[in-house]
Image (cartoon, coloured by chain):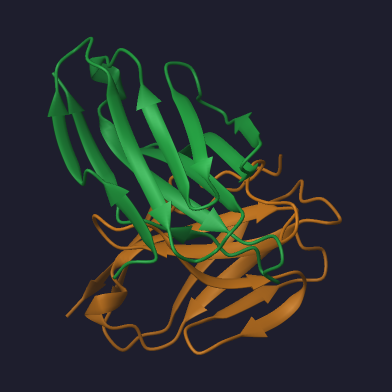
Chain colours: A orange, B green
Amino acid sequence: LAKTTQPISMDSYEGQEVNITCSHNNIATNDYITWYQQFPSQGPRFIIQGYKTKVTNEVASLFIPADRKSSTLSLPRVSLSDTAVYYCLVGALPSGGYQKVTFGIGTKLQVIP
Amino acid sequence: DADVTQTPRNRITKTGKRIMLECSQTKGHDRMYWYRQDPGLGLRLIYYSFDVKDINKGEISDGYSVSRQAQAKFSLSLESAIPNQTALYFCATSDFSENTGELFFGEGSRLTVL
């Protein structure tokens, strides 16, 4: 299983861009990188997924360098409602399922007014 | 109505009691999962099922059992609850044919074992 390392917590002011980096040095060739967001007392919610280079959707961008040993989730102009825990997952998705993917403890992002 | 529904949402019980947490989904997904969340430990996989006849242990299955009664229903049982099973439990689903393998979570069941 690919082990991931991400900061335990981060603080940011409203309106700033937030970048959360995840290290996954032993990522396998067929592993995808997926990020989830979890608000207090709710289940995690899918944000974005990528394999290489850059992926962007209406919520975030995901930057993956050529060696794929790390990835960065970028949240543009955060608001108080972006305060949550963000999980970086690495695994052989999508068809493989989640049985060999671990969530870890995630990064707790606190957005400050 | 939620696509993935868990009952009960909150439960307090005593050591040694049998507890069942139920999960039902209206998404038509084939895959279902049970996770446990503890402060500082993230989410850990207890059991997963890829279809009605396929049940598999996750990383922390000891003390738990599951039943996949139908494609839409996946129940988690604690045969004899103990205090260290106090946690927030999440059911999740995913679709084999979905391009991203996205997991859809229920709202959680908070279990307290006294």
Camera-side residue of B63 and B49? B49
Residue at image position (30%, 23%) is: B85
Query: Which quadrant would the N terminus of chain A be assigned to in this image?
Result: top right
Given the current orientation, which residue lies at the most extreme front position? B70
Query: Which quadrant would the C terminus of chain A be assigned to in this image?
Result: bottom left
Q: Where residue A19 appears, x then y in whole percent?
A: 49, 73
Q: Where residue A104 appears, x then y in whole percent?
A: 49, 44
Q: Where residue A65 appears, x then y in whole percent?
A: 75, 71
Q: Quadrant of residue B29?
A: bottom right
Question: In the rendered picture of this protein, how many numbered marks are placed on residues?
Answer: 0
Q: Quadrant of residue B25?
A: bottom left
The reply, left or right, for residue B12 in relation to residue B89 is left
Q: Quadrant of residue A40?
A: bottom left
Residue at image position (82%, 70%) is: A66
Tell me if residue A31 comes above or below residue B15 in the rendering.
Answer: below
Q: Is residue B38 visible?
A: no
Camera-side residue of A51 and A10? A51
The reply, left or right, for residue A40 in relation to residue B90 is left
Given the current orientation, which residue lies at the most extreme right position? A29
Residue at image position (59%, 70%) is: A72
Q: Where residue A13 appears, x then y in whole percent?
A: 27, 79
Residue at image position (29%, 19%) is: B84
Q: Is residue A111 visible?
A: yes
Camera-side residue of A71 and B10? B10
